[in-house]
Amino acid sequence: MIQDTQTVLYSLQNYKSPRSKITQLLRKGKLIQLRRGLFETDSRTPPYALAAAIYGPSYISFEYALGWYGLIPERVTTITSAVFRKNKIKEFKTPFGLYSYQPVPARVYPYAVTMLAENGYNWQMASAEKAICDTLNKALPVKTLREMQKLLFESWRMEPEMLSSLNLSDIRFLAPLYHKRNPLLFLELLDNTGENVQ
């Protein structure tokens, strides 16, 4: 269960020195510090379930979401999330793993995101289409469809048939919102891929 400092101190108010007790609980692993002023009480909590509480508002996206949907073969251990109205990447190293928060344009932030829940924890996850667009938005720009194919199928090691599982209408809506070449070139690639993409 996620708790802030004030909640923990309140629960320890009967101790002579609540702050010393916090230090003791941290040392014993009964309390796990996520960041300054924020703690988790259960070491078995899935790391992804903590992402929104550590820094936000945010939703899980980028490489972690691509792995979540099986779009890339690598197992991604860093929990990558999107934020808006922030100008730099923020990272938190915790006992649950590394969390990375990267900005996306405010105009794309609210779309194609789902609220998920597990054992009392809530977090948001980008759709597969949104995760690809978010990742392309932060990637180095490519100039041609051939370069886009190389990025997707060689660098990311995505299987070409994965494209057929994507919702083309969602990408048609999302891609122009980034005002970047990469998402638009990806949309062009999908439009040229054929009838299998829906």
Image (tube, helix red, strand yellow):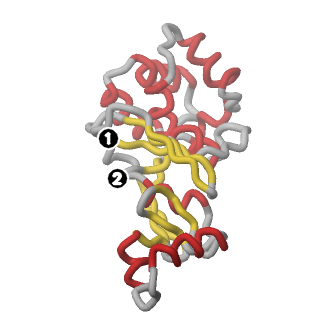
* Front-most of residues 37 and 58: 37
Mark 2 surroundings: few (<14), some (14-19) or many (≥20) residues within 10 A:
some
* Quadrant of the rendered image containing residue 148: top right
The 10 Å Cα crowd at callout 1, few under 14, some 14 to 19, many 20 or more, is: some
- Is residue 168 or residue 13 the one in the foreground? 13
In this view, 175 is above or below 25: above
Percent x, y of residue 39 = 49, 67
| 191 or 58: nearer the viewer | 58
Please say if the residues under marks 1 and 2 sit with CB atoms less than 8 Å apart.
Answer: yes
Amino acid type, label 2: Pro
Q: Is residue 168 left or right of residue 31?
A: left
- What residue is drawn where x is 67% and y is 31%? 158
Q: With 63 as the anchor, is 102 left or right in this view?
A: left
Q: Residue at x 43, y 77 (%)?
A: 8
Q: Is residue 153 above or below residue 168?
A: above
Residue at mark 1 to residue at mark 2: CA–CA distance: 8 Å
Disc on res. 84: 1
Q: Quick check: 40 left or right of 58? A: right
Tag 2's secondary structure? loop
Kindly identify the residue that appears in the image at 36 percent across and 35 percent down: 104
The answer to whether residue 123 of the structure is visible from this angle is yes
Please, which residue is most extreme toward the bottom here? 14
Q: Position of residue 85 (x, y in %)?
A: 27, 39
Locate residue 48: give its quadrant. Answer: bottom right
User: Which tag, 1 or 2, sits closer to the chain's start?
Assistant: 2
Instruction: Identify the residue at image location x=45%, y=80%.
Output: 17
Question: Label 2, on which residue?
Answer: 57
Q: Amino acid at mark 1?
A: Phe
Residue 198 visible, this angle: no
x%, y% of residue 146? 59, 10
The residue closer to the viewer here, 167 or 119, is: 119
Q: Residue furthest front?
A: 16
